[in-house]
C-alpha cells in the first residue's frame, strides 16, 4: 500500500512538472512597450517564432498573430460572434487549405496594443480557430522592422 502512495506521488509530481514546463516554453510574445514619443510598438517573438499582440476589434479584446501573408485582418466564426460583428458581404478566401467561403465586414476599428486603425475591413473565415490574424490591410499602415526575435511597428510618416 505504501508503495502505491509513493508511486502516485511521483506520477503527480511528474505531471505537474510537465505542465509547468509546457506552460513556460509555450509562452506568448512579450510586448516590450509602446514608445509615447514615436508611437512605436516593440514585440518579442514567442517560442514558436510568431509575434502575438493583445488588441481589440471594435473594443472587444482579441489576441492577434502577425501574419504578413494575410491580406486582411481575419477572425474565425466563433470570434466574430464573440466580438459581435454584423454579417458582412459574402467572399471567398484562397488559403493554403483551399478556397473557403466567408464574409468581409467593413468599417471596423482594430487595435493592436497602442496602435489602432479605424474604418478597416475584417474578414470572417468560419473554419478558422486560434488567434485572429493581423493582416496587411492593418500592417501596411505601419513601418515594420524585424531584427532577429524583435519586431517594431511604428506609424508611417504622413505624406
Image: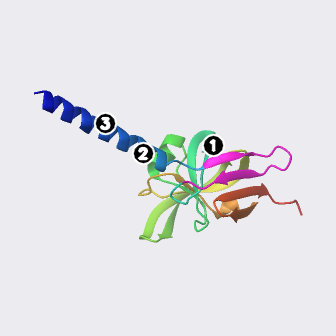
Callout 3 crowding tier (Cα within 10 Å): few <14, some 14–19, many ≥20: few
x and y percentages locating residue 156 in the rendered image = 82, 60
Disc 2 packing (10 Å; few <14; some 14–19; many ≥20): few
Q: Residue visible at 72% across and 48% down? A: 116
How many angstroms separate mark 3 from mark 1 (CA)? 44 Å
Among numbered discs 3 and 2, the one appearing first in the sequence: 3
Residue 138 on image: x %, y %: 68, 58
Upstream in the sequence, badge 3 or badge 1? 3
Contact, mark 3 vs mark 1 (Cβ under 8 Å): no
Q: Residue at the location (73% across, 48% down)?
A: 115
Callout in the foreground (3, 1): 3
Residue plotted at (80% across, 46% down): 35
The residue under label 3 is 13
Q: Which residue is mark 1?
A: 58
Q: Which residues are magenta?
A: 30-46
Badge number at residue 21: 2
Residue at the far right: name it: 159
| Mark 1, secondary structure of its residue | loop
Amino acid at each position: 500500500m505504501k508503495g502505491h502512495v509513493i508511486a502516485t506521488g511521483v506520477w503527480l509530481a511528474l505531471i505537474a512538472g510537465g505542465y509547468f514546463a509546457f506552460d513556460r516554453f509555450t509562452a506568448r510574445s512579450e510586448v516590450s512597450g509602446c514608445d509615447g514619443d514615436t508611437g512605436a510598438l516593440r514585440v518579442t517573438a514567442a517560442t514558436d517564432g510568431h509575434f502575438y499582440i493583445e488588441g481589440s476589434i471594435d473594443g472587444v479584446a482579441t489576441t492577434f498573430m502577425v501574419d504578413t501573408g494575410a491580406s486582411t485582418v481575419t477572425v474565425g466564426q466563433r470570434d466574430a460572434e464573440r466580438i459581435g460583428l454584423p454579417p458582412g458581404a459574402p467572399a471567398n478566401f484562397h488559403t493554403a487549405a483551399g478556397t473557403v467561403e466567408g464574409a468581409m465586414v467593413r468599417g471596423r476599428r482594430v487595435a493592436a496594443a497602442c496602435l489602432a486603425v479605424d474604418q478597416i475591413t475584417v474578414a470572417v473565415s468560419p473554419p478558422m480557430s486560434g488567434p485572429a490574424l493581423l493582416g496587411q490591410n492593418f500592417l501596411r499602415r505601419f513601418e515594420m522592422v524585424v531584427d532577429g526575435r524583435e519586431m517594431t511597428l511604428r506609424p508611417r510618416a504622413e505624406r
